[in-house]
């Protein structure tokens, strides 16, 4: 099966009030764990690659690993997506390379400049049948390419969201309603501005919304990291019930990276602790892959709700 577009995936998800998990991939074990979870749950899947992932793994290796997943799991619907593309050139490069979806993240730009850049990507992508995710509003948090402090974060204005979608022709929109990237999302009570999401949905009926920074920062893995030599005190994510609630109001894509990182690292730390004589990478990357598989299966079945939606 070739890679699929996100267009039909989102349409079905919107109508069915569930979301598709978009999981960040950086190596073979991550891809295998995620794909196995999607296979067993009969779930559609978005695998996403950031600029940092391309730099780390070399884009050719990642593309070929995803092609291997297609051969290994021909029954699956898999979309390959660029996460946080920051330039037209990067979006064009991955479109030319066969990605079926791209994000152009102009959220740091003034409104008119964000529109102009996004529109440029939309024009190129649509001519090739590729879907485009834009972003309006700014999430706090840290990733390889972007570092936004809490003071610089701003929630998405619903009227601007409508104007942005109308003028750019994007296929989906990432919004800021209280999530953030990384493992430190909340200091106080976790909260999402669901009323703002509802207003955006009212203004853009039928239009797929994307939630970045949607990891739950699963306490079991935070504790495992801290117990076996890690230092990530106070890490806190988005409670699962808030993600489930968001999927009822137009959120069709839920981005998850930090939970993968925490699961793998926790399990690897434990493996080193339990067997200090272990220096066979298969004996710690194997359990890490299993942890990714179990965690993603849980997300698909209990958080985004895409199990059985193939
Ligand atoms: O939102 C960002 C993703 O977690 C990717 O992070 O840029 O460090 O690969 P990265
Ligand atoms: P998390 O840091 O919450 O996993 O968010 C990932 C993300 O938004 C990727 O674009
Ligand atoms: Zn993101």
Image (cartoon, grey):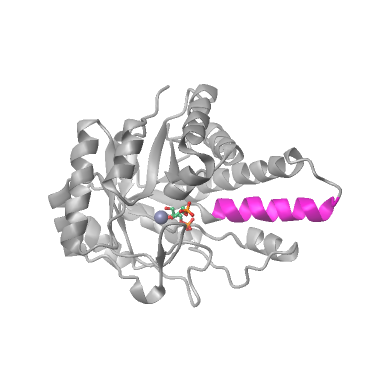
Residue 10 in view of the camera: no
Measured from the top left, where is residue 37 in percent x and y? 56, 38
Q: Quadrant of residue 34?
A: top right
Measured from the top left, where is residue 113 in percent x and y? 18, 58
- Which of the pair 149/46 is nearer the observer? 149
Asked whether 298 falls inside the magenta stretch, the response is: no
Asked whether 271 falls inside the magenta stretch, the response is: yes
Q: In this view, does 116 lie to the left or right of 38?
A: left
For the point 39% across and 28% down, the residue is 3
Q: Is residue 96 above or below residue 275?
A: above
Judged by its main secondary structure, the magenta piece is helix
Query: Which quadrant does the C terminus fall into?
Result: top left
Query: Which quadrant does the N terminus fall into?
Result: top left
Q: Is residue 305 above or below residue 258?
A: above
Measured from the top left, where is residue 254 in percent x and y? 41, 51
Measured from the top left, where is residue 217 in percent x and y? 55, 61
- Which of the pair 248/173 is nearer the observer? 173
For the point 48% across and 22% down, the residue is 74
Q: How many labels does the image show?
A: 0
Report the magenta residues as a range.
259-276
Q: Is residue 2 above or below residue 41?
A: above
């Amino acid at each position: 099966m070739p890679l699929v577009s996100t267009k039909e995936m989102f349409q079905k998800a919107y109508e069915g009030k569930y979301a598709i998990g978009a999981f960040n991939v950086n190596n073979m074990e991550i891809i295998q764990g995620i794909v196995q979870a999607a296979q067993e749950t009969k779930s559609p899947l978005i695998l996403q690659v950031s600029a940092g992932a391309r730099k780390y793994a070399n884009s050719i290796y990642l593309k070929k690993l995803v092609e291997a997943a297609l051969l290994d799991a021909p029954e699956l619907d898999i979309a390959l997506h660029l996460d946080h593309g920051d330039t037209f050139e990067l979006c064009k490069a991955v479109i030319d390379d066969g990605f079926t979806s791209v994000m152009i993240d102009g959220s740091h730009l003034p409104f008119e400049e964000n529109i102009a850049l996004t529109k440029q990507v939309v024009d190129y992508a649509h001519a090739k049948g590729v879907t485009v995710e834009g972003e309006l509003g700014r999430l706090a948090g840290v990733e390889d390419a972007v570092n936004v402090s809490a003071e610089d974060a701003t929630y998405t204005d619903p009227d601007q969201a409508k104007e942005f979608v109308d003028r750019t022709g994007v296929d989906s929109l990432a919004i800021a309603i209280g999530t953030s990237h990384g493992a430190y999302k909340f200091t106080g009570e976790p909260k999402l501005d669901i009323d703002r999401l509802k207003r955006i949905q009212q203004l853009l009926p039928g239009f797929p919304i994307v939630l970045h920074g949607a990891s739950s920062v699963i306490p079991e893995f935070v504790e495992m990291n801290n117990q076996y030599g890690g230092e990530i005190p106070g890490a806190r994510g988005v409670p699962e019930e808030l993600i489930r609630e968001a999927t009822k109001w137009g959120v069709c894509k839920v981005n998850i990276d930090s939970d993968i990182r925490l699961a793998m690292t926790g399990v690897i730390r434990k493996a080193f602790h339990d067997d200090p004589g272990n220096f066979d990478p298969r004996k710690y990357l194997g359990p890490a892959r299993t942890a990714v598989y179990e965690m993603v299966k849980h997300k698909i079945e209990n958080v985004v709700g895409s199990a059985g939606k193939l």
